[in-house]
Amino acid sequence: MRAKNGHRDPAYSTRSVVRACEILKCFKRNEELGLDEVAARCQLSKPTAYRLLRTLVECGMLKSLAKNVYSSTGGQSLQWKFRFGYASQTEEFSFSRLVSDSIRSCAYEAGVELLVLDNCYSSKIAIRNAETFVREQVDLVIEFQTSLESSSFVASRIEEAGIPLIAIDIPHPGADYFGANNYRAGLLGGQALAQACIRQWDSKVDEVVLLDLPMAGPLVRSRLSGMLAGLRELRLNVRDESVHFIDGNGRFEKSWDVMRRYLRRSRSTRTLVGAVNDPSCLGALRAFEEAGRAEQCLAVSQNACIEARREMRQPKSRLVASVGFFPERYGETVIALALDKIQGGHIPSATFVKHQVITVENVDKLYPNDKLIPNGDCDSLLWSQH
């Protein structure tokens, strides 16, 4: 909305829409512009310009000609081969956002229109989104939601409509699966944690605390079972009675709170911490720091998101490793599987991520562009890897 003098009224403006419009206006007819030129003309940071450019490409307003080179579509609509539904896990975690960015980008490059809905880490919203996909009659659904309890309803509703389903990271009945090899990922993390315990504590350990995510079901919990197996594989004396499972809900704040309360009654001076994901592990580490007991723990996490990579680069960090899931690569495999399936090809019932343990020794080699990403701008990781 504009004020009476014809200028834009900031009270009614949406900043991201204004920026997107400025990008569109900077393209002359048939002009090809690179990322650097667009960022300079619109006075935007390159990560911000990249995210807006990719969004405009996905919406058919711009064309991607080559790596970081764009042009106007001239107002012509794109012709899509298929229309897929994608339900994202949440916008809360950088991991989930990177999965979504990767899927959006690869769908566009494959000529697939994507109807994107956000499950908001909620079983009720996931069920509602499944109903939307059915009403919209999409050709295939890609589902990323955490609740095992709602997975049966989501899967059955989509199956009843005759729509193929691919589930990410949380299995759904009858769906093809892409994501973590949970036990394997846990085993790798447990081995890394055991090696750190041997080096730093001469194999001595008082207790093991494992931050769980019960809502995701037994398969995700097998990450923690794998961690225990990895610890014992290297002959650490881990007694069953010294192992404690705590529900951290996969979230930083909840894990911080439950670990804070746990430490009030624990007198252990050598605690090994394992968690189902990075936010949960980082929340637990914050509790140890707050209690002045950081030196009394060693920790390993899962996913190796940028927040964890930044933490392990800190001097004297107690995060010894995080197992890599590489969410920025999910889209390439997921969209390829979806296209094979929708076109009648045979795909495996389960396709697993190739995990790798990421530590301070190899993090800069695997993620050399982390230093280009400003703090608080984790969404631009996908840009930094292009």
Image (tube, rainbow, N blue to C red):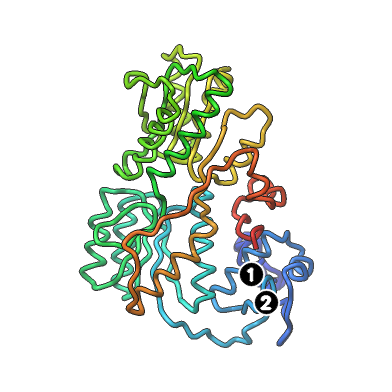
Residue 175 appearing in the image? yes
Farthest residue toward the top?
Answer: 267
Label 1 and label 2: CA atoms lie apart by 8 Å
Say the numbered circle drawn on residue 85.
Answer: none
Disc with the residue nearer the chain's start (1 vs 2): 1
Q: Residue at x 74, y 70 (%)?
A: 38
- Contact check, label 1 and label 2, Cβ < 8 Å: yes
Q: Where on the picture, by quarter, is residue 345?
A: bottom left
Q: Quadrant of the N terminus?
A: bottom right
Q: Residue at x 29, y 62 (%)?
A: 175
Residue 139 appearing in the image? no
- Residue 42 image point, x, y percent: 75, 67
Q: Residue at x 46, y 76 (%)?
A: 112
In this picture, is 305 found above or below 13? above
Q: In the image, 170: left or right of 158?
A: right
Q: Secondary structure at mark 1?
A: helix
Q: Secondary structure at mark 2?
A: strand
Q: In the image, 319: left or right of 351?
A: right
Q: Name the residue carrying label 2.
A: 70
In this picture, is 74 found above or below 104? below
Q: Amino acid at mark 2?
A: Tyr
- Residue 300 image point, x, y percent: 50, 34
- Residue 97 image point, x, y percent: 51, 55
- Residue 41 image point, x, y percent: 78, 70
Q: Name the residue carrying label 1.
A: 53
Q: Amino acid at mark 1?
A: Leu
Q: Quadrant of the C terminus?
A: bottom right
Q: Residue at x 55, y 46 (%)?
A: 305
